[in-house]
Amino acid sequence: MNPDIVFTASGPVDIEVHALNVPDGTPVTVTINHSIAGVINLPAVTLQNCKATFSATIPAGSGVMQAFATYNVGGPTGNGQ
């Protein structure tokens, strides 16, 4: 695994996710594939003013971080139209 990020020490971190053209109110999640702790899934945070802020306690080590958001483009779907 080629790391996106290296956590030099264990402890609390704040993670900010910024979005462009994603509606406010959209739930955002973050997943960290950590070299020591394995997969860390952070609980969903609602996007506000194009930003979602997460707080987590992460052990020292390296990892790959991904953010996810799912929303409908152009209005609601699943109504049969």
Image (cartoon, grey):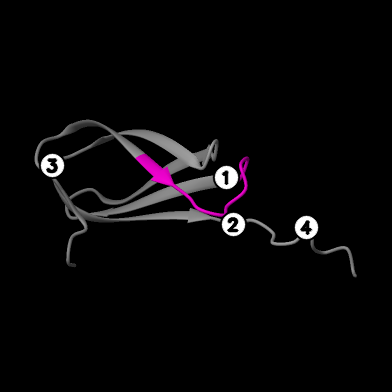
Q: Which residue is mark 1?
A: 27
Measured as percent of width and height from the top left, residue 27 is found at 57, 45
Q: Is residue 49 left or right of residue 63?
A: right
Q: Which residue is mark 4?
A: 75
Between disc 1 and disc 4, the foreground one is 4
Up-down relation of residue 45 to residue 81 (above or below): above
Q: Secondary structure at mark 2?
A: loop
Near-viewer residue (45 or 47): 47
**Distance from label 2 to label 3 (Cα)?**
30 Å
Q: Secondary structure at mark 3?
A: loop
Measured as percent of width and height from the top left, residue 3 is found at 18, 60
Residue found farthest to the top: 12
Residue 70, disc: 2
Quadrant of res 2:
bottom left
Between disc 2 and disc 3, the foreground one is 2
Stretch in magenta: 16-26
Looking at numbered disc 2 in the image, what kind of residue is underneath it? Answer: Thr
Q: Crowding near pointer 4: few (<14 within 10 Å), some, many (20+)? A: few
Q: Which residue is mark 3?
A: 60
- Mark 4 and mark 2 residues within 8 Å of each other at the beta carbon: no
**Distance from label 4 to label 2 (Cα)?**
13 Å
- Mark 1 and mark 4 residues within 8 Å of each other at the beta carbon: no
